[in-house]
Each structure stands twice: as C-alpha cells, then as structure tokens.
Image (tube, coloured by chain):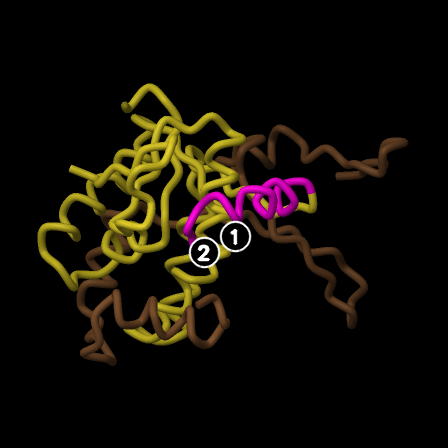
Chain colours: A yellow, B brown
Amino acid sequence: MSEKICFIDADVFVHGLLESDTIKHKASRKLLEQIEQGYIFCITDYLVLTETFYILENYRGRETAVEMIKKIMSLYNLEILSLDGFTFFEGLKRAEKYNLKINDMMHYTLALLKNAAGIYSYDMDFNGLEVKRIEPD
Amino acid sequence: MLTKMSKGLQITIPASLRNELGIDEKTLLDIGLDRKTKRIIIEPLKESSFKTLFAKWDKIKNRTNKSVEELQREYERENMLH
C-alpha cells in the first residue's frame, strides 16, 4: 500500500495528534511520522482539515489547534486538495448511489479522482466502496 | 537585494536567502503586508519536526472528556451534515 497514494481522513489526523485511544494513537502517529520522513505520500482536503481543527480545538484550545494544523500543512509529502466546482459536481452525481454524508462524499470523490489506493480512516461509513478503507497499522 | 517581477508577476527568492533559510520549491510561504511600512513580508511556514512538537503537545491537558467520535458528531450537527 505504501507505494501508492492514500487519502487521510480527519479522525486519523486527530488520533495521531492526541491520545484518546492508545492503539489508534500509536498507529496514526506512526503514519504521520512516515509522511514527514518521506516514506509515504498522502492526500487529504481542506474539509478534512476544518473538521480536524474543530476537534483539536475542543481538546487543546485554539492556539495549539492552529499550531497542529500548520504543521500538517507544512508536510512535503501531503498534498492538500481544494474542493472545486468540478469535484463538487462529481460528488453530487455520486450522492444518490452512496450512503455517505456530504463531506465524506466529497472526500471519497477526491480520493476516487486521484486514483487513491485507499482511504485511511476509522469511519466505517467508508466500508465497501471502490476505494477501500484502511486503518493505520 | 534588488529583484524585478516577471511578466507573470512572480519573483525569485535569491539562492543565498533560500539556502540560509533552508527553503525550497516545496516550502509554503505566508505572504503578508505591513501597511505601516508598506513592506511585503514573506514568512516560510517551516515547522519543527513532529518529534519536537509531540513532546510539547503531549504535555497539554485535554479540555474535554468527550470522545473523538462524539466531537465528530457534534461537528456534523453544527455544520448540518447529518
């Protein structure tokens, strides 16, 4: 899996940055460090970062949340994608086919359009789709 | 150092400055304007390593006992994603 691009969901960033669940924390932190060290290349989007920020802010306050998101944004091997009209429309076309929340639909569409090999997420809603859900290990 | 904008309104950061700051084409730059002095400020977004930051962040206490999943649901409700 490591030689192919994978999409990262908000819960993986959150678990990597703070310890709420020890197993998820260790695995997600390892993944973030592997991205930083250039062993793997991943993608995410700004909707994911918004959700990540919301959760981090609740846990650690705004100042630390800003610092954490800035660190994520500075990772060379993480491409952060914007949601443009084209992607949004592609997501809308798929909205009836998939039972995903609208933001997850957009994440999934971006992953699909980027030919991602997987979606790193703990959210079971991504189960059973063409782009398979994977958990950091 | 004096430089000129290209036709595409781009500027090149001189190699000597890039080398001194350890920045390259992948570095994110925060560009702002100091309105008082009319200076354009370009600040590289260069963060410390996760190792250093984790050591700092891990000392900060959580402000909530809610689980990540609870906060995700809260976020979805607040943003009407459900």
Q: Which residue is drawn at 60% across and 43% down?
A: A93
Residue B46 magenta-highlighted: no
Q: How far apart are marks 1 and 2 (CA)?
A: 5 Å
Residue A54 x/y as whole percent: 41, 69
- Residue position for label 2: A49
Q: Looking at the picture, how far across and down is residue A126, in whole percent?
A: 33, 45
Looking at the rendered image, the quarter that the N terminus of chain A falls into is top left
Q: Give the letter of the chain under mark 1.
A: A
**Percent position of residue B52, x then y:** 25, 51
Q: Do the residues labelled 1 and 2 touch (CB within 8 Å)?
A: yes
What's drawn in magenta, residue-wise?
A86-100
Determine the residue positioned at 85% across, 33% down. Answer: B8
Q: Residues within 10 Å of mark 2 (few under 14, many from 20)?
A: some
**Residue B1: image tag:** none
Residue at the image point whose x is 50% and y is 56% from the top: A102
- B73 versus A3 height, above or below: below
Residue A19 image-quadrant placement: bottom left
**Above or below — where is B56 with respect to A40?**
below
**Location of residue A62 (image quadrant):** bottom left
Looking at the rendered structure, which numbered label has been put on residue A46?
1
